[in-house]
């Protein structure tokens, strides 16, 4: 059951060989077993989950099951879920119980999926290691002395350790893809606007996008079918015809040896320069060779402004965050300092005590770059760079269908090894931030192992709305390989 | 030294939409605290704004009414500052690219007409309300008002006196109500003005340092506040002092302005485009369809009344002071099939007098336009004379029914029968030989006395024109 696909689980449920209550309890038991060490889940509420599972079983019995009905899913603690404590990894919201459901949560609930629990993350999604949260670091199931990546590290570890069949996360600068890579799972960030942001606690509004995290591309497609869709409550949500991503997985090629014949894979030279660890480069190269074996053609391309994406990202994201996080002021909900003098003192103490160091750092940076006299030099300039980066991709997609390269420059690094050097940590986002800045869909799939037997992720970046194309390429790769089925030792 | 006053006005007009500018919560005034504040208004984590197109439509209507440019693309920006009644920690407003740019408003003053140029008008959301009383050392927050749609209308510094500023504010107030975008209720805060006031030596080009008087919610306070502020600044300058740029509040009880905060404590609002909202795009078709739905505007109406109805500029101005008044007038003349001057005279005279005495608005008039038209019809048809008509008017005001019924009930029908009048006049001439003699001796006044006697003899119902005519004939004979 540990490596069963969502489709297989769904079939077992439909055939009554398994009930949702059993499946949910099975995973709750695994959470109880592995979470004390891994710290992937922040909130588990067995009663609430089992009640949902019972409702799902009733739906199945009534013949009203949909593809995700009865499947327990781990939710990153950034999604508001009615009746669930929703902390966003922060002391600021340590006791916040959401009175409403995010759009994504609504969609999953309506499909009959079960909320297995809320997963750990970097505080307000600010980080690349899931160490910045109030609740302590997530540990990597492949090596608990290493980070699980971030910010969706809890969701990634939950799937990697098979505590959950699949999970949902959010990606602002790589927060789905990088932890997926570091824990050996698959994760997808859709085109900006495909998944509603309503009820997803905002970090950087113009970059945030929710997406699925699972063991395989096939599972991702099934989840994206439910998560995607127009929502009038999010003005940046896109109104377009629904797509069945599971159908996109299939290939019509008659030559079953070359299912990806005709696919042009762009390999940007900038993604293989200094800073890329050798073990990662080797695994990625092997994956590209595998794609060629499947019929794809490799095209050398250039994304000349790649080097500017991290600097641009670390201006724009903090700028938006500094404003988005102003609502956490101790007035209406959330943390308020127990003792204070006047109003200004209440704000100061509440925010000084309620936010962690990384969040404060980004609020300071964001406040600075938006300040009078600095706005043009930083914020406006970063926006111009953003347009240049998007243009690079538009140019590139004249030559290729998908872009591939490493997701992260290295395998999972040691806990605490980067916290003292934030800039070094920011540079880990070198390959992932561009897709957010351009609004493009991107994913990471496991493609081998590097130093210390740690997973390596392959990144795929598609043109706007090329989720289907990306998922097909990834699925065909996963039909031919078994990296995605490897499981950390000790989690069997 | 002679000083010149320079004033610019910023007005926050609450747009008359049923729901808020970025949420579905109701905007109705007077609800219990916080019952009209939804998840978006209280800024729960994860919520997002969605623009109310009704607010956009009203902004466009305003822009077209003042001859402004409607920007085909405008941008919502966040104005960041902390305050307990500002739930998100920022206000969504428009900064670099407002929806309405330019335009002007013509203001009728005693000494003539003046054009006040508008800089811009932009959409924004209102904040909530902080309540500092009744909470035992704490403050209460009411977020019902948070997210209420506002149109902020900004003028150029074109006004030169408190009177001009008030005339502008009144004209703007009439216009926003005229085009149906704002209810104009100043007590409820639907129409609030800030006045930027400075003085400079007469003839100087450079503007003096200004102070901004915030939240003037009545025309009288506006006039008092500006006059006080002008005196204060002139005295300060004449005593060798300098005016500091600051925000001031008017205290109507003490009739003075006092400093609220100086420029030094001014916030850096860190405006930037709101990433939760797409730029506001307005199509040419939308603009044209709104333009075609605009009512005839006060200025055009005023000109038409002067030109086609031959009304005086004053009457035309009064009749277009609000849409309700103009509608009333037009209902009356349409029922009468003309009678412009008659209608204008009765509305601006008798009706306004009665309304003023009763402290009522025209919309609350106990006397409808159809009723008044009925009376004027009787007057026009000489069924009743002017004196009788006033009596009918009072009766109608008191709810005694329609003109014809009142005339009949009170026996006010005018006597226009020549034979009957001749008989009466013969009697008057016999009874007043002294007046007859005086008139014949050239004393014009005596004629009026005889007319008065004739009217008295008909108990006020005689047709005055006919009486005049018959008297003249008989006295000449």
Image (cartoon, rainbow, N blue to C red):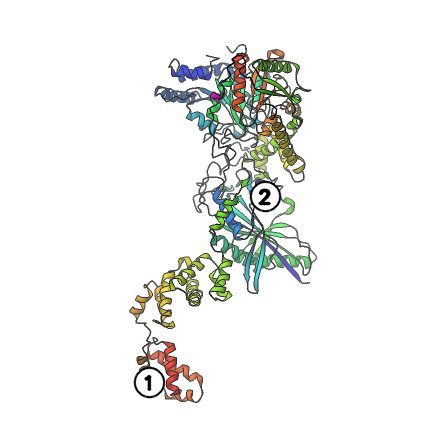
Mark 1 and mark 2 in contact? Answer it, CB < 8 Å: no
**x and y percentages locating residue A103 in the rendered image:** 47, 30
Q: Nearer the viewer, residue B224 or A448?
A: A448
The residue carrying mark 1 is B426
Specify the quadrant of the image occupied by residue B383: bottom left
Of B407 and A32, nearer the camera is B407
* Gap between marks 1 and 2 measured at Cα: 82 Å
Numbered disc 1: secondary structure = helix
- Looking at the image, the residue that sits furthest to the left is B409
Where is residue B454, by image quadrant?
bottom left
Mark 2 surroundings within 10 Å by alpha-carbon count, few (fewer than 14), some (14 through 19), many (20 or more): some
Region in magenta = A239-261
B255 on left or right of B466: right
Classify residue A213 as left or right of residue A276: left
The chain carrying label 1 is: B
Q: Which mark is residue B105?
A: none
Quadrant containing the N terminus of chain A is top left
Mark 1 Cα shell of 10 Å, populated few (<14), some (14-19), many (≥20): some
Q: Is residue A119 visible?
A: no
Instruction: Identify the residue at horizontal 35%, vertical 79% (top origin).
Output: B456
Q: Which mark is residue B97?
A: 2
Q: How many marks?
A: 2
State which chain disc 2 sits on. B
Name the spot of residue A60 as percent of width and height, x first. Answer: 37, 20
Residue A325 lies in quadrant = top right
Asked if A489 appears above or below B89 in the picture, the reply is: above
Judge whether B402 appears above or below A151 on screen. Answer: below
Residue A370 can be seen, yes or no: yes
Is residue A243 in the magenta section?
A: yes
């Amino acid at each position: 059951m540990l490596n069963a696909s969502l489709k297989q689980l769904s079939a077992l449920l439909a055939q009554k060989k398994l009930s949702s209550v059993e499946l949910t309890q099975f995973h709750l038991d695994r959470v109880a077993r592995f979470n004390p060490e891994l710290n992937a889940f922040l909130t588990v509420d067995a009663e609430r989950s089992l009640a949902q599972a019972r409702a799902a079983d009733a739906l199945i019995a009534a013949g009203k099951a949909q593809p995700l009905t009865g499947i327990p899913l781990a939710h990153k603690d950034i999604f508001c879920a009615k009746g669930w404590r929703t902390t966003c990894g922060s002391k600021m919201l340590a006791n916040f119980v959401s009175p409403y459901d995010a759009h994504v949560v609504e969609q999953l609930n309506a499909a009959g999926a079960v909320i297995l629990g809320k997963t750990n993350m970097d505080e307000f999604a600010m980080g690349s290691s899931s160490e910045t949260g109030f609740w302590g670091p997530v540990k990597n199931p492949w090596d608990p002395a290493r980070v699980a990546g971030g910010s969706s590290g809890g969701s990634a570890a939950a799937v990697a350790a098979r505590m959950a069949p699949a999970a949902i996360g959010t990606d602002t600068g790589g927060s789905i893809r990088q932890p997926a890579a570091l824990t050996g799972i698959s994760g997808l960030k859709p085109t900006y606007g495909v998944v509603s942001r309503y009820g997803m606690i905002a970090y950087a509004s113009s970059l945030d996008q929710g997406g699925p995290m699972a063991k395989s591309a096939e599972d991702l497609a099934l989840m994206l079918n439910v998560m995607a869709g127009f929502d009038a409550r999010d003005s940046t949500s896109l109104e377009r015809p629904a797509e069945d991503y599971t159908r996109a997985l299939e290939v019509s090629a008659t030559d079953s040896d070359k299912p990806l014949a005709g696919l042009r894979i762009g390999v940007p030279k900038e993604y293989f320069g200094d800073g890329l660890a050798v073990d990662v480069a080797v695994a990625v190269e092997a994956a590209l060779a595998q794609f060629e074996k499947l019929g794809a053609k490799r095209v050398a391309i250039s994304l000349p402004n790649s080097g500017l994406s991290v600097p641009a990202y670390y201006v724009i994201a903090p700028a938006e965050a500094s404003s988005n996080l102003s609502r956490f002021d101790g007035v209406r909900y959330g943390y308020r300092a127990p003792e204070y003098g006047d109003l200004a003192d209440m704000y100061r103490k509440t925010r000084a005590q309620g936010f962690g160091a990384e969040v404060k750092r980004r609020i300071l940076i964001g406040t600075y770059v938006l300040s009078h006299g600095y706005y043009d030099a930083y914020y406006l300039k970063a926006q111009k760079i953003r347009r240049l980066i998007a243009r690079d991709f538009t140019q590139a997609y004249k030559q290729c269908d998908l872009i591939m390269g490493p997701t992260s420059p290295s395998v999972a690094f040691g806990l605490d090894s980067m916290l003292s050097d934030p800039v070094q940590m920011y540079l880990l986002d070198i390959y992932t931030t561009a897709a957010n800045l351009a609004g493009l869909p991107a994913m990471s799939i496991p493609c081998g192992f590097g130093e210390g037997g740690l997973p390596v992720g392959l990144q795929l970046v598609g043109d706007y709305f090329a989720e289907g194309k990306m998922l097909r390429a990834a699925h065909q790769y996963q039909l031919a390989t078994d990296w995605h089925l490897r499981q950390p030792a000790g989690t069997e | 030294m002679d000083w010149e006053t320079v004033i610019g006005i910023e007005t926050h007009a609450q747009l008359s939409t049923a729901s808020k500018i970025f949420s579905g919560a109701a905007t109705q005034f007077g609800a219990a605290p916080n019952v009209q504040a939804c998840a978006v208004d209280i800024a729960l984590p994860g919520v997002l704004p969605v623009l109310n197109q009704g607010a956009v439509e009203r902004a466009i209507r305003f822009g077209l009414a003042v001859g402004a440019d409607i920007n085909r693309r405008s941008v919502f920006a966040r104005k960041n500052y902390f305050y307990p009644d500002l739930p998100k920690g920022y206000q969504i407003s428009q900064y670099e690219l407002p929806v309405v740019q330019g335009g002007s408003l013509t203001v009728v003053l005693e000494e003539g007409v003046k054009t006040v140029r508008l800089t811009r008008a932009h959409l924004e959301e209102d904040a909530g309300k902080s309540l500092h009383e009744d909470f035992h050392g704490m403050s209460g927050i009411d977020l019902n008002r948070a997210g209420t749609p506002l149109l902020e209308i900004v003028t150029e510094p074109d006004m030169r006196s408190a009177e001009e500023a008030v005339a502008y504010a009144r004209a703007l107030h009439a216009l926003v109500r005229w085009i149906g975008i704002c209810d104009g209720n100043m007590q409820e805060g639907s129409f609030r003005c800030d006045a930027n006031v400075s003085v400079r030596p007469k003839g100087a080009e450079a503007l003096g340092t200004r102070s901004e008087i915030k939240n003037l919610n009545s025309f009288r306070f506006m006039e008092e506040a500006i006059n006080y502020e002008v005196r204060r600044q002139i005295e300060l300058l004449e005593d060798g002092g300098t005016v500091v740029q600051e925000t001031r509040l008017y205290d109507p009880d003490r009739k003075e302005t006092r400093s609220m905060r100086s420029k030094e404590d001014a916030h850096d609002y860190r405006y930037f485009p709101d990433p939760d909202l797409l730029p506001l795009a307005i199509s040419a078709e939308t603009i044209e369809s709104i333009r075609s739905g605009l009512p005839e505007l006060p200025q055009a109406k005023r000109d038409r009344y002067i030109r086609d109805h031959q009304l005086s500029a004053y009457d035309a101005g009064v009749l277009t002071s609000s849409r309700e008044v103009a509608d009333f007038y037009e209902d009356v003349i349409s029922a009468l099939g003309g009678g412009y001057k008659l209608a204008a005279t009765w509305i601006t005279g008798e009706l306004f007098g009665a309304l003023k005495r009763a402290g009522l608005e025209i919309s609350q008039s106990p006397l409808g336009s159809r009723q008044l038209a009925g009376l004027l019809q009787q007057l026009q048809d000489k069924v009743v004379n002017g004196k009788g008509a006033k009596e009918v008017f009072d009766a109608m005001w008191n709810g005694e029914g329609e003109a014809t019924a009142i005339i009949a009930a009170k026996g006010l029908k005018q006597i226009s029968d020549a034979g009957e009048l001749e008989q009466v006049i013969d009697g008057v001439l016999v009874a007043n030989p002294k007046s007859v003699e005086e008139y014949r001796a050239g004393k014009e006044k005596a004629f009026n006395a005889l007319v008065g006697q004739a009217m008295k003899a008909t108990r006020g119902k005689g047709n005055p024109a006919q009486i005049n005519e018959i008297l003249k004939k008989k006295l000449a004979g």
